[in-house]
Amino acid sequence: MSFLRIRINYNSNENVVYSRLFNEVLKTFVSNDMTSWSLNKGWEYGPHFNLLINKKSHFFSQDLVNTVQSMIESFIKEFPSENYDKDAYVEKQKQLKKIENKELDHKVVFDNNSLSVDEITLSNIYKKFENEAQMESVFNAECQLSSYIIKMRANDEQPLDIALKVMLMTACTFSPHPSPLPEVDEYNGFLSFKANYKFWLHGLNEEDKSYIESKFSEKYSEYIEVINEFLVGKSSRSTDFSKSLNELYLYFTEMAEQGYIHERSPHPLEMLKPKEELSGFHQSLFYNDDGSVYRFPHIFSGYRWLMNIVYKNLPFIGCSAMDRQFLNYALFNFDDNNRSLISQFRESIKIGEFGY
């Protein structure tokens, strides 16, 4: 796959970017039958958006690209984003480079309120994946996610509420299965939230752990009603979106069965920390009693691949790393105490009872 990449250097992720720019770009693509494109947000070399357009698509044309580029330039001119301190950003980028193990020159920061266009291949975009099938699957999933996220942001929905909706509906693509572990009463989509949260929490010192758990518990007690309202409200659901998520889950499960992905993709299967370095929860999840590594079924590998793509797109939604961990905490706790309500919601979106 060969792509045209339009990099939009823009220091804002407010709803106006979606209502006045990206929603109009979406409409332009739709009117030209162009579906092979995606949008994501990044921090490398300055805050920006990447618009990827598949040049191999039958509906790709330079005229379409010129139209979209002109729309972006006009928007930036009318709604320029606030400039930021480049020196401070260099220091921030230096830390992010270390945390995310990125290969880049942290001293380089592009000018804000500008754009650039270049050609790029799939392997340059998704450098750390194991095979081309993984790369294509991520791009295809992000093509679908981009449209839904743009529509929700353009409707002035709050980023945390959108992230809640997306994470909840993703979790409900995975139907519950019996668990062989005494610590886990059932395998379901919410188990990934708990695993992700516990892994993150395990890396903190005891003081920070105590502070985080106290703050999250307090915030969760206030947020329960928001989750309840979403689960029982008919107007906030999208059966089109849930259908797309379910189709992606089934597709990724088939990929797992065919050997293109596994439970630790895109990292090597052998890449697992020694048992003693893991939290107690992860020790029971990843290792058998005899010390051997537990192999998850293909259905879980397919679901995990989908959830990791959703996690990857949370910054695009406008959800911070701390927001992500709060939602992990809130959702696995809510599921533990409201299985019946979750079950009803899962059934309703799977049969397409509600929508807008």
Image (spheres, rainbow, N blue to C red):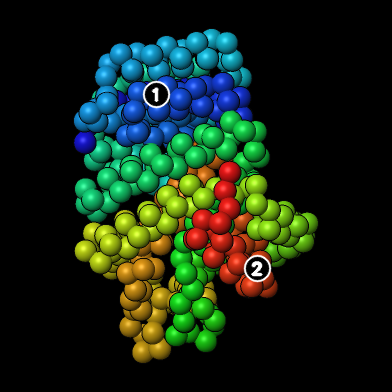
Q: Position of residue 329 (x, y in %)?
A: 62, 62
- Left or right: 8 as drawn, with respect to 85: left
Type of amino acid at the residue the image marks with label 2: Leu
Q: Residues within 10 Å of mark 1 (few under 14, many from 20)?
A: few
Could you tell me which residue is drawn at 29 percent across and 22 percent down? 118
- Left or right: 105 as drawn, with respect to 132: right
Image position of 72 with respect to 343: above or below: above
Q: Tell us which disc is closer to us: 1 or 2.
A: 1
Could you tell me which residue is drawn at 62 percent across and 72 percent down? 339
Q: Position of residue 225 (x, y in %)?
A: 75, 57
- Left or right: 227 as drawn, with respect to 169: right
Number of the label disc, if any, that sits on residue 31: 1
Number of the label disc, if any, that sits on residue 341: 2
Closer to the camera in the image, 239 or 188 = 239
Image position of 22 with respect to 78: above or below: below
Q: Is residue 108 visible?
A: no
Instruction: Answer with mark 1 or mark 2, whichever residue precedes in sequence.
Output: 1
Q: Residue 270 appears in which quarter of the rendering?
A: bottom left
- How many numbered badges does the structure rendering display? 2
Closer to the camera in the image, 336 or 295 = 336
User: Where does the N terminus fall, quadrant-wise?
Assistant: top left
Number of the label disc, if any, that sits on residue 237: none
Q: Is residue 75 visible?
A: yes
Q: Residues within 10 Å of mark 2 (few under 14, many from 20)?
A: some
Q: Position of residue 267 (x, y in %)?
A: 31, 58
* Helix, strand or loop at mark 2: helix
Type of amino acid at the residue the image marks with label 1: Ser
Could you tell me which residue is drawn at 36 percent across and 68 percent down? 299
